[in-house]
Image (cartoon, helix red, strand yellow):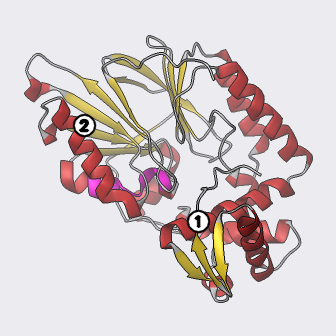
Amino acid sequence: MSTVPALPRSIQLIERDWLSCNQVLLFDEAHDPGETAVTLIDSGYVKHAALTVSLVEHALARRALPRRALRTLINTHLHSDHCGGNAAIRENFGVRVLVPAGEFDAVRQWDESRLSYRASGQRCARFEADQSLAPGARLRMGGAEWDVLAAPGHDSNSLILHCPAHRILISADALWESGFGLIFPELEGGSGFAEQRAVLRLIATLDVRTVIPGHGPAFSDVAAALGRAHARLDALVADPRRNARSALRVLVKFILLDRESLDLAPLAAELSEATVMTSAARMVGMSLADALDWAAVELERQGQLRREGDTLFNREPELAGTD
């Protein structure tokens, strides 16, 4: 691994464990601390919302900043692990919330048929959005200008943020050091592989020295990460069932991380409206019940869970979304 350049003082990464995504704090510091404005990128999963609040409080306190300094929360996309803490952050800090333009109306109406939580069998506390954020926008955060770029692939409405001055990319789930997030549109009858390819090619054109991903540590060897991402994408395009199999394992593991234990027998009935999972099962030629049982066997084989009859218990190491 290459050495990662230190982030500017105006940018702080809060690296999180799975269920929650990473958070990024950007400080627009003023001579009067009471005038400093802070922006938060993403808020983690609802199970860990209280911890997210505590981590943000600690980050502000270390700089002797009042709670009101946190002015804005921006979501790169609206998967539950990136916005599950929105309601708690808004309640505790009084922030304005910006969400990707493509899902602004769905949030305002809380249209669960258009949001991903029911479809993936996950939870998200209802939250309010104040403003939409569209590709092409430019934001002033952390003392520098950031370009808002479209990053469809993992999620059709996802955004990434690039700061030319600092040569930093906040990549969300479009690029990790070891790959990228599941390609959800392909599991829902849409197109995602071609879009993910385009996003990787876009990132290759940017002047980037440091990537802050949605999961995992910041990294600087962008070319190597892009190479791994392209290789993974090639494998998915060659056999789309790989994406479906990964989805079944990852989503079952996610539910298990959330609940810590669960009974497998009634899970298929419970998830009958989880369209991402039913579609993934169909893609691999299984009923949902059989697909969930297959995922449990695979996760047990990988050491991701412990099984006692039909009861599953979470176990380390955690799954990182690869197959």
Q: Quadrant of residue 263?
A: bottom right
Q: Position of residue 287 (x, y in %)?
A: 81, 80
SS type, badge 1:
loop
User: Distance of mark 2 from mark 1, alpha carbons?
Assistant: 30 Å
Q: Is residue 197 above or below residue 102?
A: above
Other residues around mark 2 within 10 Å, as few (<14) / some (14–19) / many (≥20): some
Work out whether residue 272 can be spotted.
Answer: no
SS type, badge 2:
helix
Range drawn in magenta: 81-89
Q: Disc 1 marks which residue?
A: 315
Q: Is residue 15 above or below residue 304?
A: above
Apparent side of residue 27 relative to residue 184 in the rendered image (left or right):
left
| Residue farthest toward the right in the current orientation of the protein | 238
Looking at the rendered structure, the kind of residue marked 1 is Arg
Which mark, residue 59?
2
Looking at the rendered structure, the kind of residue marked 2 is Ala
Foreground: disc 2 or disc 1: 1
Apparent side of residue 89 relative to residue 221 in the rendered image (left or right):
left
Q: Quadrant of the N terminus?
A: top right
- Membership of 21 in magenta stretch: no
Give the residue displayed 38% in from the left and 59% down from the top.
48
